[in-house]
Image (cartoon, grey):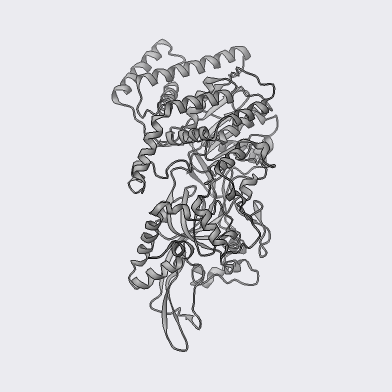
Amino acid sequence: MPCVADWLNNPFSIVQGIFAQNVPNSDWEKKVTEYFKEKLKENNATNWVPSLNDVPVHYLKPNSLVKFRCMVQDMFDPEFYMGVYETVDPNTNARVLHFGKYRDVAECGPQQEIDLNSSQTVTSERQTFYCVPVPGESAWSVVVLKPQFYAYISASQARVSPSTSYTPSRHKRSYEEDEDMDLHPSKQKEQHIGNSRSGGDIHGCVEPKRLETEASAGHHLISPNCSPPLDLNFPLPGEKGPACLVKVYESWDSFKVNDVLEVYGILSVDPVLSIVNSEESCAVPFPTDSSALDPMECMDTAEEQRVHSPPASLVPRIHVILAQKLQHINPLLPACLNEEESKTCEYLNLTSLFVSNFMSELSPVRAELLGFLTHALLGDSLAAEYLILHLISTVYARRDVLPLGKFTVNLSGCPRNSVFTEHIYRIIQQLVPASYRLQMTIENMNHSRFIPHKDYTANRLVSGVLQLASNTSLVVDETQLEQGQLDTTGVHNVTALGNLITWQKVDYDFSYHQMEFPCNINVLITSEGRSLLPSDCQVHLQPQIIPPNMEEYMNSLLTAVLPSVLNKFRIYLSLLRLLDYSISDEVTKAVEEDFVEMRKNDPESVTADDLHRTLLVARFLSLSAGQTTLSRERWLRAKQLEALRKARLQQQKCVNGNEL
């Protein structure tokens, strides 16, 4: 039987063996997939597979098995390749069949030539996805390398020589030390970036811990054969990490743009892949691209060739053997949680046990989280309640164009030009797997690229800030907004933000038309007064304490919480948004009767919107307590919370006499 070194370090040897045993039977492709699927089920074998999210490409062995957790940023046109081809020895006329699947470059033995006219040639089709790391992925959610992989790295060092010097210092640091670095910014170097690392300026630089795992040094990478610099097309400014061309061979119709995937495949970094970037040649790797079959493909623009065939050292290729769409990216949760996925999940029993055990201790976890967020919100327990409901909200269905389950909260009453909103974002960043802080300044509105658009010259989708993965937490900081003039770009960006909040969709710009891309983004708006943007619920902050030093107060709050407690908060928020929820006919009738009674008592102020919002609050209130059905008790509690929230807004309106 092949050992780990065979299927992990040299998967081509496994594929070749299966191909040789089954050719010309076409079942060999299915048997390859089944072989690796079974191997990855054995003894947590997925932990042995090196991840491009954790290790720079120059530190990985070419043609080895790797994994990559990513978001599909763009889909290129399908390409044709020779799935099976035949070589011939001109001297002996001996013929040999080869497989072209999982390859970018044809392989020939000594004294062999490819017979392009062979009747044995099989032309196949595959789809190429341009994939990037999950935008705004929090540092804590980046999977820590397992001990098994330490052994793999040690064993591989004797065989693999990095193309540049690299010391994997993060491998020497324990998970607890990683948490300590996350929670104590003073122990880190300058690391804040505009998106998910600190909530600082929108144009920042990345955190050192993540820089250790990257071969790249910026959003634009310079290749010896590329001029101008290659734009890796990350949606968020300042993002780092590997971009990959992911070659998918089966069921690519089940994936779409913005899906989050985990792929297992063969790493290809052959230097010949850079040949299309050479100004001296129009040649392409043979035999996989359609241009190998049609010379007219050489008439593609130089910009399209540069974008679609970048140097493999900067944008490696992954030839997918197995791929799955992820429900979530929280590494503290099992990968399979819903019932349908769990049927094929190898750890069904363990998953059920994990969920049931955690649900049994849900009440104290909620109480601790409520206390933690109450302190973060300066003693305001009502705002903390609504923040919990917001963080577990998700779009669970769509009725026509209306997204059901969205719960955008406008936290008004935030101090203007204060570090308070920045630290609130830092706390949210420590709780959710992916987040981004958008500073709503005139400059950012007028100069940032929010809406993805189609570049027909390069034949690619140019990313924008609003191209985010599902369940990303977007914190819009309106306290930075000052008087000024929005230009055309600024107006379009604000409109796009409003459409995202209201309809949970972004209209991508394809020049001649717009295309709707549904999304599921949790939006929290922090503002001084009522937000200029729409929201589902406005909660006015009422601080009970005013710390003399806000930064010191917030830092001490993060310092005091144990990593184990933080992990419970993270599991709590991710798990609850995946639970099913229903309302019985009996409770539905009681709610209807209650609403009719409320309308009788106060017909002017109680509207259908109030009923919808109260039902949302009741839904998330029930889920936050681990209840998947609405009870009379939770409905009454939801009404109480809404009454307190409205009374606070009315009180503020009387005090200020403004739009609140």
- Res. 536 in view: no
Q: Is residue 169 left or right of residue 621?
A: right
Residue 304 at x, y percent in the picture: 58, 61
Q: In which quadrant is the N terminus drawn? A: bottom left
Q: Nearer the viewer, residue 45 or 647?
A: 45
Q: Is residue 426 left or right of residue 35?
A: right
Residue 29 at x, y percent in the picture: 37, 65
Residue with the most extreme bottom position: 91
Q: Nearer the viewer, residue 466 or 390?
A: 390
276 relative to 366, above or below: below
Q: Quadrant of residue 207?
A: top right
Q: Nearer the viewer, residue 470 or 189?
A: 189
Residue 348 at x, y percent in the picture: 34, 44
Q: Is residue 633 left or right of residue 523?
A: left
Residue with the most extreme left position: 586
Q: Quadrant of residue 533?
A: top right
Q: Nearer the viewer, residue 475 or 292?
A: 475
Residue 399 at x, y percent in the picture: 39, 35
Q: In which quadrant is the C terminus drawn? A: top right
113 relative to 525, above or below: below
Q: Residue at x 60, y 66 (%)?
A: 274
Q: Residue at x 54, y 63 (%)?
A: 61
- Res. 524 in view: yes
Instruction: Report the number of numbered marks.
Output: 0
30 relative to 360, above or below: below
249 relative to 376, above or below: below
